[in-house]
Image (tube, rainbow, N blue to C red):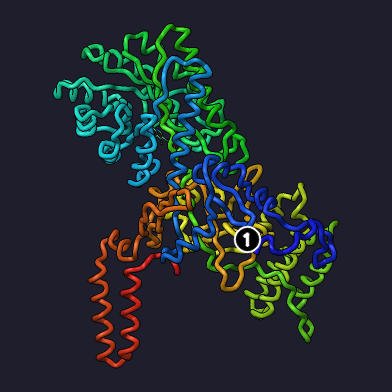
Amino acid sequence: MVGSQPQQSIESLDNNGHYSRQWSIEDSEELYRIHGWGDPYFGINAAGHVTVSPQGDRGGSLDLHELVEALKKRNLELPLLLRFPDILEDRIERINACFAKAIARYNYPGVYRGVFPVKCNQQRHVIEDLVRFGNRHQFGLEAGSKPELLVALATLKTSGALLICNGYKDRSYIETAVLATRLGHRPIVVLEQPEEVDLAIAVSQQLGIQPVLGVRAKLQARGIGRWGGSSGDRAKFGLNVSEIVATVQRLRDAEMLDCLQLLHYHIGSQISCISAIKDAIREASQIYVELAQLGANMKYLDVGGGLAVDYDGSKTNFYASKNYNMQNYANDIVAEVKEACEEKNQPAPTLISESGRAIASHHSVLVFDVLGSSDAPSDVPPLSENKEHLILRNLRETYASIHEENFQEAYHDAIQFKDEATSLFSFGYLSITERAKAEQLYWACCRKVHDIVRDRDDIPKELKDLEKTLASIYYMNLSIFQSAPDSWAIDQLFPILPIHRLHEEPTRRVTLADLTCDSDGKIDRFIDRLNAKSILELHPLERNQPYYLGMFLVGAYQEIMGNLHNLFGDTNAVHIHLTPNGYQIEHLVKGDTMTDVLQYVEYDAEDMLESIRKSSEAALQAGKISIEESQRLLQNYERSLRSYTYLS
Ligand SMILES: *Cc1c(COP(=O)(O)O)cnc(C)c1O
């Protein structure tokens, strides 16, 4: 199709006789900011489809729309979570390359040994892939709980890779970690609470194994934003400076000061501002050298997570963005640590980072379809033959009068008349048909006012919400609570755009609503150049044509934080690996069936079916249902139990 027609000139006359530019894929690129957040993995091709380049600039690309169509032919229903393990590999390569470059640049006399925090995406295939891709770099894992420790112990096979043991620990956690040394693992038990110090000493004495210990410091340097509370005096985890000094003393008394080899901190996730990262590493470097001077056998400095993802592509310190890149991050860490160690004549530590978001976010894309839309009415209702009620005449007059100079005043009039119409209706002076007309006229006024103000820079405050009020609602075949919980819980912004029709102008302004019966199940904030915008530009729906949207950068945290609101379950997930001739489906993880989700809440599908069978048998006996109806009901019920929780 594309390219079969002669290229039209860029300027042409539209229906209203205005000159208008043809919409191009470059316009879509700019509108959806795909280069900002998507490079080098996502782009748009000449067919107007989103492309995925799982190996970044090193490999070929896939047409996401074609991929989804092909998966649908294999009976994989939407919503679909697409995972691209090649992207994970590229991220691991990138972070190692950035640290290697920084180490060379500053002549740093130490190495980098990253770990992946399991909590960020515990899915088995993801962790197994990360371990495999990280092998060349001796990339390890970080566990934040006992179950995550079990995952790490079973999965991490890389010799020399570190296993950082964080989180709340009881005796069995510490014992398991310490005993794993005997299997060749390199666990480091990070003491985060004062009580853990004695526990670690006791376990070590009882087992007769010298563990490698670390301390997590509560820094004064703070990450700003959502997770700012992860550091500072009131932080949930970590030891303050006096507790660290007491820990050193305690370990010295137990003749275990040699075991203390690591300093860890984590000032929060998605640190959008490089200055916060610098402040933290500066403070931590000093604590590190001081610990060495106190006699601890210091070897590792673990800077935690926090390396941010640029969700809106703005490269600013807005919370959905970051004002630095991975290389800046590595440079600042390496340079600061080197300087602090040189000054105090201490050997440089092995540097560890626990980046989760920055490794995992890009590799998953959620693709879903739009089921339908609802639009705010905006047509002016036709005049009645009889004389209309005064309130309707007032509204018509207001509508006719709206122009550049009086739109604000006219808008207030329209609101007032609409309110009056509602009161008149409540007291029985206006029929329901008349009230409907009044509301229609009100909407028409709103739209006319909005058309005047929409492209102005100085939209009056009270008119700012008009955009949202007038937007259409597109219904997504999706549960926000299951698939993008952070969008609901913490206003996280994810890039969302159609994966096709990108050479067409998206003329509708919409907000999105999900399948749940929860009014919170919506998305009405979207990425923009500055801050967020309240509408998303999408294409008009076409009858009997599917319309697919993609939500991007959802590979970190979303899956495990998702919940079963309204019993919408896990989506189908497909792992796609790029091959020289196209792609290969590596794993297919089927989403929950209704039987699965019902089981979580202790229902037994067989019992439920039996109960329906009994009632339909009784209805049959009583002559209330025909045999055909009862068969049909039972078949529907049974089929539903076996099928996907989303709409087909
Ligand atoms: C959550 C967490 C991380 C991962 O943080 P990201 O911002 O996703 O990189 C790392 N370390 C600790 C201790 C954490 O709690």
Query: Percent position (x, y) of residue 465?
Result: 66, 55
Q: Nearer the viewer, residue 19 or 225?
A: 19
Query: Percent position (x, y) of residue 398?
Result: 80, 67
Residue 530 versus residue 570 in the image, above or below:
above
Q: Nearer the viewer, residue 175 or 544?
A: 544
Residue 239 versus residue 535 in the image, above or below:
above
From this viewpoint, is residue 234 visible? no
Left or right, 481 with reference to 537? left
Residue 414 versus residue 392 in the image, above or below:
above
Residue at left offset 77%, top offset 76% = 390
Query: Percent position (x, y) of residue 251?
Result: 25, 15
From this viewpoint, is residue 512 visible? yes
Residue at left offset 60%, top offset 68% = 374
Left or right, 134 with reference to 50? left
Query: Percent position (x, y) of residue 202?
Result: 18, 23
- The residue identified by callout 1 is 501
Left or right, 516 with reference to 504? left
Residue at left offset 50%, top offset 36% = 270
- Amino acid type at circle 1 is Arg
Residue 499 versus residue 86 in the image, above or below:
below
